[in-house]
Amino acid sequence: MKNLLFIFITLITIANVSYTSFPVVECNAKIIAIESEDDEDDELSLLEAIFLGVLVVSILGFAAYFLFRAWWRAWRDNIRWVKIVTYILLGFFLLFLILGLVLNAIFSGGSFM
């Protein structure tokens, strides 16, 4: 453990001390700004966007599946805090749903849909 701590401190010290490997001198020369003229857009192509969407949905889908599975097993095993938290979350969801419908009716001229 002491060796690991020593290596960690050494790496941090080296990273903070060794900024350049060449001498830096002050110079009053004119600074020239170089602007790159890229004609390419920084937007994703359609294939990249589709791949990114599939990746994100699959990761979130697997996470949601395992979370739901663990929650369901805890519910079946009658773990008390899981049932309490579930009822609280369902209550908040119902409250926000009713609040959204009421605010929609108020700000849209009286219609619920």
Image (cartoon, helix red, strand yellow):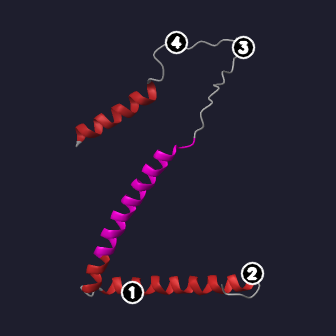
Q: Disc 1 marks which residue? A: 84
Q: Which mark is residue 107?
A: 2
Q: Is residue 102 above or below residue 45?
A: below
Q: Residue 27 location, x and y as percent?
A: 66, 11
Q: Which residue is mark 3?
A: 30
Q: What distance separates the C-alpha of mark 3 from that of mark 4?
A: 19 Å
Mark 2 or 3: the one toward you: 2
Sort mark 1 into few (<14), some (14-19) or many (20+) by Cα contacts within 10 Å. Answer: few
> What segment is highlighted magenta in the picture?
43-70
Badge 4 element: loop
| Residue 68 falls within the magenta-colored stretch | yes
Left or right position of 26 against 69: right
For image coordinates 32% across by 77% down, the residue present is 71
Dot 2: element = helix
Q: Which residue is mark 4?
A: 23
Query: Looking at the picture, how far across and down is residue 12, in whole percent?
Result: 39, 34
Q: Which of disc 4 and disc 2 is earlier in sequence?
A: 4
Amino acid type assigned to the residue bearing label 3 in the image = Lys
